[in-house]
Amino acid sequence: MYPNGIVYSEHPMSTSTQSAMPRYPLAQHLTQHSSLIYGCMGLGGGWNTNSISAGDIKQTEAIIECCLDEGIRIFDHADIYTYGKAEIAFGQVLQQSPNLREKVSIQSKCGIRFEDVHGVKRYDFSPQWITHSVEEILQRLHIEQLDVLLLHRPDPLMQLDEVAQTLIALQSSGKISHIGVSNMHTAQLDFLQSALPFPIIANQIELSLAKPGFINASIEPTHHYDGMAEYAQQQNIQIQAWGALAQGQFTKEMNNDVSMNVQHTTNMIIQLAQQYDVSREAIVLAFLTRHPVSIQPIIGTTNLARIKACAQVNRCELSAVDWYGLLESTRGNEVP
Ligand SMILES: NC(=O)c1ccc[n+]([C@@H]2O[C@H](COP(=O)([O-])OP(=O)(O)OC[C@H]3O[C@@H](n4cnc5c(N)ncnc54)[C@H](OP(=O)(O)O)[C@@H]3O)[C@@H](O)[C@H]2O)c1
């Protein structure tokens, strides 16, 4: 049974159509919400071989506390983030605070291997690598079970039955509770689902006001994610958006190098932030949460004030006219 009462899907600002069918079917009876996910890629002291400092642990602790204060209860990891240090830092905070585990939901990813003595950078969905990765993730995080394991990027060499058997074994042993994927298009997701006896609950993709391909795919199908918006709604698959803040492209000080589209969109965001009485970050994220698939933005900022600014998305639902205004601005042209 899902341990910590956290809904992966339902957005507090859901419209009637959205709330009618939570994206996360196993959690329908649960009441707590997490409209945002905190992305842990920036934790652990950076992408270097320095050991973790007391400051890195303190930073992680402060960020977790800030997220919980703001109602953000899902934490997104990957085995590779800062070469494992993000998970180690998070695990140390979990160890120091025994009650924390039940308040948070933890997901992590595996399947990407950096260049090493065995070969070039590659994806590896072999049973050995997936199983080994999960063991290591659990050890680094000091937990018994991952709430969700995501396959990080599609491996063209994936053997369907092998992967399915591995995931089934990991779930039966209690090491993972649920399965998700990342960066998969519709056919890849459907293909994997065909061999699994339980639902794939999430697909984590790059999606923001700067990278709205997933949304444009419903308008002009020429994109990697063609059909995904409709498929995800039909199958109750949670869409998680990485890069949701577009790395601050629309919220930081504008310099002269930025394109006309970004300048125009940024000015529109400033105006909408005043109109809706929320932060600019909230407008950037509201562009995602307004979509009927109930997108969960993953925010990767390590700045506490920005985390709070992001959480204001919970009180902002864009009108359809404003949403299309942002879409037109970021596309650089009107919809056909
Ligand atoms: N599945 C995948 O393949 C995949 C790939 C990449 C990431 N992810 C996940 O998604 C999460 C978020 O991704 P992301 O970090 O690329 O995207 P993001 O949330 O769009 O960007 C966060 C970055 O932008 C900076 N930033 C944001 N607003 C800013 C502002 N107003 N001024 C200056 N800097 C600003 C942040 O710096 P500060 O820290 O200073 O705020 C941080 O470095 C990651 O943590 C990870 O969990 C998944």
Image (cartoon, grey):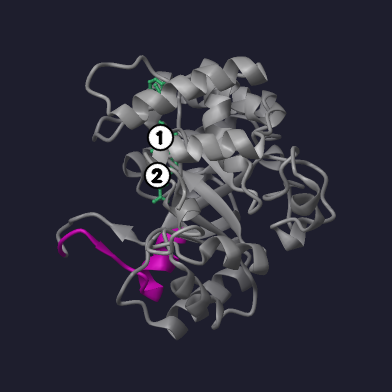
Can you give x and y, in whole percent of width and height, for residue 266 in the image?
A: 43, 23
Q: Is residue 225 magenta?
A: no
Residue for badge 2:
211
Q: Nearer the viewer, mark 1 or mark 2?
A: 2
When asked about the image quadrant of residue 312, the answer is top right
Q: Is residue 52 visible?
A: no
User: Ligand 1 is in which quadrant of the figure?
Assistant: top left
x and y percent of residue 23 in the render? 69, 57
Say which mark, if any, is on residue 174. none
Q: Position of residue 13 (x, y in %)?
A: 74, 38
Does residue 262 show up?
yes
Q: CA distance from mark 1 to mark 2?
A: 8 Å
Side of 58 where 289 appears, left or right: right
Amino acid type, mark 2: Lys
**Which residue is found at the position 27% from the left and 25% from the top?**
258
Identify which residue is drawn at 27% across, 16% down: 255
Residue pointed to by mark 1? 246
Is 129 a magenta residue?
yes
> What is the quadrant of residue 260 in the picture?
top left
